[in-house]
């Protein structure tokens, strides 16, 4: 589906992929001609009703927008990459306003609660909704931080090279992976408890990782240092921190880079090398995936305006 922008303002595309058991992923992509379009574009208010209660996720991959929901969130909510919105609904009436200072990409995931109960069990689904703060029907949590290693699973579930049947099958597998990994992240009690030595070792690895200052040892080297196989060490670390060793290290270093860009003027190439990237282009691509903007754009927007 194409968004009907006035001529010259830009282009917007929306694609819907549905699984055989009613789970739906909506992918939206907008490219703006900033020389012609206004700084904000208000999209018409629209209403959606569901046949049954659903679990909803709204995620911004890059860019930003404002959302308002007449009944539940009349004040505008600013949504940008890094914080996901979760909802438990049977309908919504929403208005979106796009910030055109950067191109925009979003994902919307909709899963019937009934289907989640089948997959995960009613007790755990209720517990999951409680952790997310959306136990009540028609409630939202607009700012819940989920590691990119988890939320990015959905991005890998879309493969436009496939025919419709296999595209739906690939999405189904990706959603199951996402729900399982999100469940582990929200409640570590569903992971078999490790002994005290394993938990202590995972914490020691954590302290070691944040002290590396740009060096990136292999998983085998870390395992040898901490007297564990790479697979065992990664499993212990994931159980303790909700993401793998290298996912944690990547996110930690990118967060460091974001802070450095906000407060300093160090050249981006120097900063990239300082946190372990041999090539600045690799750093730029990783930073953009996590925060929705290249580091240069992020620095210019974060700098105080004269």
Image (cartoon, rainbow, N blue to C red):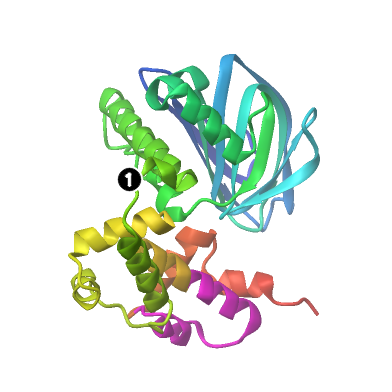
Identify the residue at horizontal 38%, vertical 38% (top origin).
180
Q: Where does residue 197 sit, x and y in percent of width and height? A: 31, 64
Which image quadrant is residue 162 in? top left
Identify the residue at horizontal 43%, vertical 47% (top origin).
188
The region drawn magenta spans: 254-277
Q: Where does residue 183 sit, x and y in percent of width and height? A: 44, 40
Identify the residue at horizontal 20%, vertical 76% (top origin).
221
Query: Number of callouts in the render?
Result: 1
Residue 198, placed above or below residue 49? below
Residue 3 visible to an observer of this rendering: no
Q: Secondary structure at mark 1?
A: loop
Q: Where does residue 71 sit, x and y in percent of width and height? A: 79, 27
Judging depth in this view, the residue of 242 and 299 nearest the camera is: 242
Residue 112, placed above or below residue 9? above
Label 1: how many Cα within 10 Å (few below 14, some 14–19, many 20+): few
- Tell me the residue that label 1 is attached to: 192
Q: Main secondary structure of the magenta part?
A: helix
Verify whether residue 257 appears in magenta: yes
Residue 211, placed above or below residue 60? below
Identify the residue at horizontal 23%, vertical 78% (top origin).
225
Residue at the far front in the pictured view = 196
Judging depth in this view, the residue of 49 and 267 nearest the camera is: 49
């Amino acid at each position: 589906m194409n968004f009907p922008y006035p001529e010259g303002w830009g282009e917007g595309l929306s694609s819907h992929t549905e699984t055989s058991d009613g789970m739906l992923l909506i992918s939206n992509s907008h490219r703006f001609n900033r020389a012609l379009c206004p700084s904000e574009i208000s999209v018409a208010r629209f209403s959606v009703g569901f046949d049954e209660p659903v679990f909803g996720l709204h995620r911004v991959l890059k860019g930003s927008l404002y959302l308002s929901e007449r009944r539940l969130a009349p004040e505008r909510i600013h949504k940008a990459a890094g914080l996901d919105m979760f909802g438990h609904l049977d309908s919504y009436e929403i208005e979106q306003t796009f910030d055109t200072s950067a191109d925009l990409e979003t994902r919307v995931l909709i899963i019937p609660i009934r289907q989640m109960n089948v997959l995960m069990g009613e007790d755990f689904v209720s517990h999951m909704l409680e952790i997310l703060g959306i136990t009540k029907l028609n409630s939202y949590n607009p700012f819940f931080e989920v590691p990119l290693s988890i939320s990015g699973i959905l991005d890998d579930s879309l493969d436009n090279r496939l025919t419709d049947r296999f595209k739906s099958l690939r999405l189904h597998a990706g959603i199951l992976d996402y729900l399982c990994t999100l469940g582990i992240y929200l409640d570590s009690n569903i992971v078999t408890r490790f002994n005290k030595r394993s938990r202590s070792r995972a914490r020691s690895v954590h302290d070691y990782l944040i002290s590396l200052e740009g060096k990136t040892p292999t998983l085998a080297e870390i395992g040898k240092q901490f007297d564990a196989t790479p697979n065992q060490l990664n499993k212990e670390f994931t159980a303790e921190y909700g993401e793998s060793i290298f996912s944690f290290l990547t996110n930690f270093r990118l967060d460091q880079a974001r802070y450095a860009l906000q407060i300093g003027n160090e050249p981006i190439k120097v900063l990239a090398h300082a946190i372990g990237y041999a090539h600045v282009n690799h750093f730029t691509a990783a930073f953009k995936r996590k925060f929705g903007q290249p580091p240069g754009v992020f620095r210019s927007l974060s700098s105080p305006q004269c």
